[in-house]
DNA sequence: GTGTTTATCGTCAGGCAGACGACTATGATC
DNA sequence: GATCATAGTCGTCTGCCTGACGATAAACAC
């Protein structure tokens, strides 16, 4: 072949993060405002260059900690609640995706519980949680405040891919518990599913499903009334990572 | 942050291919023999550098065509039989994965029908189909011929990830038809599932499932006896890409 | 106490999968 | 040509799971 491998073109490699959480019954993603061109002033996904001695997962975990202060869970127990779940999402390498140079971005997906301090460790005015629906809205002519969309670069595409991954993955895994605090009720877990899928679920059938799946939930013995109404049992995430049979996402 | 982005470290970016097919009732992957160090003489996955003006998917499709002569299907109809399905798998960027330099490899997964010429376009002695079980065998002390394992670099890990992706994806998609010729019988499709999953399936229940799923299979009107026994109806892959409800992989 | 909210248990019908019997249509063998 | 082996196709039955939904329980607000 006439192509000379020793003259391989140099690339910059970055990690970009789709950090999802559920806030006030809505699926939200972390967005940061760009301080420099290109796309100066526009919102984007957090991310940064991979360092010379870093693995890709390490780089993603470092960026996540810098932006949110979150630690990443042991990958062997990804469903454990109370910390963040982090996994590789996909890699984006269109030659035109960054006008400055050839950048290949390895996107990662992080799922986090609702954080007390939305932007710990960063400048609050330059990082915020925004509803996924807003971030992906094509245009916002009648917006009241400053529009957060469209995102810079190809980040709308990356975010959409991350959201779709999260939506499908909570079907057949216990990953939804990554959106919950260490102890949570069945109702709180149901509201996570409802927010991520954007549908209403039957509380009785949901309760039967999650409590009937062995290893999904472990009762802690405590109860809480923080959601109002009758006291609800508290649970921790069990060891099971795969849901079999899966939780079915309602049609339409 | 003390890290200077303008001094980002340069990376080489490659695509590696997990090309799977079903040959003689066994799941096989394409392996090539390395002609240069490191790992000279060892078997590896096909792959190569991404060129300066190429998208990642383009680079993967080019490498696939160079190694197998296969064209890639329209991504909008990935299940159409008779050509190859190609999708991004994952990206591997451990700093130590290539001793020469920092290489990030964007692995892709290709599914192909059984090819008449296993290594069209390449040197036959340096490219072959090998059973996945052999390629992933930890060691082969009593091997009769030249051992094909272990693979060079981290390619065993990449191959294992690709195989797992294929195994899970045929559960809920019509991707298994990508292993089949343009026209195929229900029995041939069942043997694909059996080879990929390594299990035996009940022919009657399988037949009921695949013919009862709308849009999965379209009868062509013809029949064949190439498998012996009673003539079987021939089908093409239908437009449906997602199987709902999914094909269940037997436990154990 | 009454109403509201949320949690939890139960019932019932329909759909689907696993197990498996029965029949059909070919080629191979005697 | 009869018999056998092979593979394909159609049915039946049972058990499990889900969706729809009624009913009860236990807290808080007034």
Image: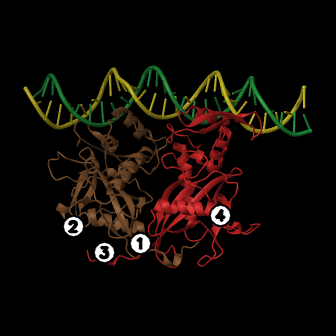
Chain colours: A red, B brown, C yellow, D green
Parent chain of label 2? B
Give whichever of A123, B15 is nearer the camera. Answer: A123
Confirm or deny contact between disc 4 and disc 3 (CB under 8 A).
no
Query: In whole angstroms, how far apart are the C-alphas of marks 2 and 4?
Result: 50 Å
Query: In whole angstroms, how far apart are the C-alphas of marks 3 and 1?
Result: 13 Å
* Crowding near the residue tagged with mark 3, few <14, some 14–19, many ≥20 C-alpha atoms within 10 Å: few
For marks 1 and 4, give the one nearer the viewer.
4
Parent chain of label 3? A
For marks 2 and 4, give the one nearer the viewer.
4
**Residue under numbered circle 3:** A5
In terms of sequence position, does the residue under pointer 4 or pointer 3 come before the other? 3
Q: Is residue C23 above or below residue A117?
A: above
Query: In whole angstroms, how far apart are the C-alphas of marks 1 and 4?
Result: 29 Å
Query: In whole angstroms, how far apart are the C-alphas of marks 2 and 3?
Result: 14 Å
Give whichever of A87, B126 is nearer the camera. Answer: A87
Residue visible at 52% across and 43% down in the picture: A173
**Residue under numbered circle 4:** A121
């Amino acid at each position: 072949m006439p192509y000379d491998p020793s003259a391989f073109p140099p690339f910059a490699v970055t990690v970009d993060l789709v950090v999802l959480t559920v806030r006030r019954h809505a699926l939200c993603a972390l967005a940061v405002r760009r301080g420099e061109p290109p796309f100066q002033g526009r919102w984007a996904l957090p991310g940064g260059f991979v360092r010379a001695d870093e693995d890709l997962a390490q780089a993603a975990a470092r960026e996540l900690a810098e932006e949110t202060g979150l630690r990443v869970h042991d990958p062997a127990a990804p469903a454990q609640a109370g910390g963040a779940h982090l996994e590789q999402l996909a890699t984006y390498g269109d030659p035109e995706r960054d006008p400055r140079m050839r950048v290949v971005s390895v996107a990662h997906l992080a799922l986090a519980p609702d954080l007390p301090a939305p932007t710990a460790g960063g400048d609050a005015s330059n990082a915020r949680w925004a509803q996924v629906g807003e971030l992906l809205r094509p245009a916002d002519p009648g917006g009241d405040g400053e529009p957060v969309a469209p995102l810079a670069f190809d980040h709308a595409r990356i975010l959409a891919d991350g959201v779709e991954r999260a939506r499908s993955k909570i079907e057949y895994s216990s990953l939804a518990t990554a959106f919950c605090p260490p102890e949570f009720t069945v109702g709180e877990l149901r509201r996570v599913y409802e927010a991520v899928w954007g549908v209403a679920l039957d509380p009785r059938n949901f309760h039967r499903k999650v409590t009937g799946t062995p290893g999904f939930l472990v009762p802690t013995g405590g109860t809480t009334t923080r959601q109002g109404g009758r006291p609800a049992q508290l649970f921790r995430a069990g060891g099971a990572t795969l849901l079999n049979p899966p939780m079915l996402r309602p049609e339409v």
